[in-house]
Amino acid sequence: MGAFVALLRAVNVGGTGKLPMTELKAMCEELGFVAVRTYIASGNVVFTSRKSEAAIKTALEKRLHAYAGAPVGVLMRSAAEMAQVAADNPFPKAAPNRTVAIFLDKAPPADALAGIRGQNNEEVRLGRREIYVHYGDGMGTSKLVIPAAKAGTARNMNTIATLAKMAAELQP
């Protein structure tokens, strides 16, 4: 059995995509996932499964679509991949609550940084299947737009560290 982290897009953010974490946990258990745990109310769930990452993603997106009546994006990482995202943080000295990884389904295009608009005091670096951003002045006033990140979902480094730890605890 592998340990996985599922990150849902646009759940319980800014008044949209309401999904109680008890419902998310129940859905995952109905799909046969084991040792299901959620973390904060923004669509983070950790579990084990014998299924492949692709099969988990497909099943969870289908179930969430049925629940929400609209598509809900799911970004998947194995426990090892989530730990690697934390380890690869190119801004290790920056405040973890001002540094995010934007999770993508595949590697960002080589020209991903070229399309950025509204950059002020933010630093941006490409990862394996992530785009890292350090918001020097915080996210609240940022006008940063990263077109390559449109289908992704962001988590700050504190959340990533916690999810990596939770997933690691599920591994044999």
Image (cartoon, rainbow, N blue to C red):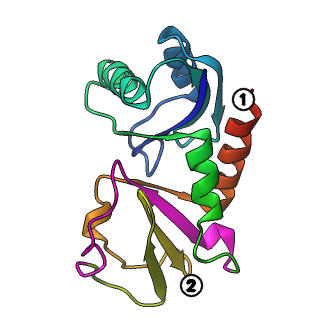
x%, y% of residue 94?
66, 79
Instruction: Name the kind of residue labelled 1 in the image.
Output: Leu
Task: Indicate the quadrant where residue 22 lies.
Answer: top right
Q: Which mark is residue 6?
A: none
Q: Residue at x 71, y 48 (%)?
A: 162
Question: Which quadrant holds the N terminus?
Answer: top right
117 lies left or right of 8? left
Residue in view at x 76 percent, y 34 percent:
169
> How many numbered markers are drawn?
2
Q: Residue at x 53, y 20 (%)?
A: 23
Picture coordinates of residue 50, whole percent (x, y): 53, 17
Q: Image check: 55 left or right of 166?
A: left
Instruction: Check the image and report above or below for 46 versus 88.
Output: above
Residue nearest the viewer, comparing 44 with 89: 89
Q: Foreground: 109 or 18?
A: 109
Q: Which residue type carries mark 2?
A: Gly
Residue with the mark numbered 2: 136
SS state under label 1? loop
Question: For the magenta stretch, what is the residue range?
Answer: 94-115
- Main structural element of the magenta stretch: helix, strand or loop? loop
Real-space CA distance between mark 2 and mark 1, rounded to the nearest whole angstrom: 34 Å
Residue where numbered disc 1 is placed: 170
Is residue 97 visible in this depiction of the protein? Answer: yes
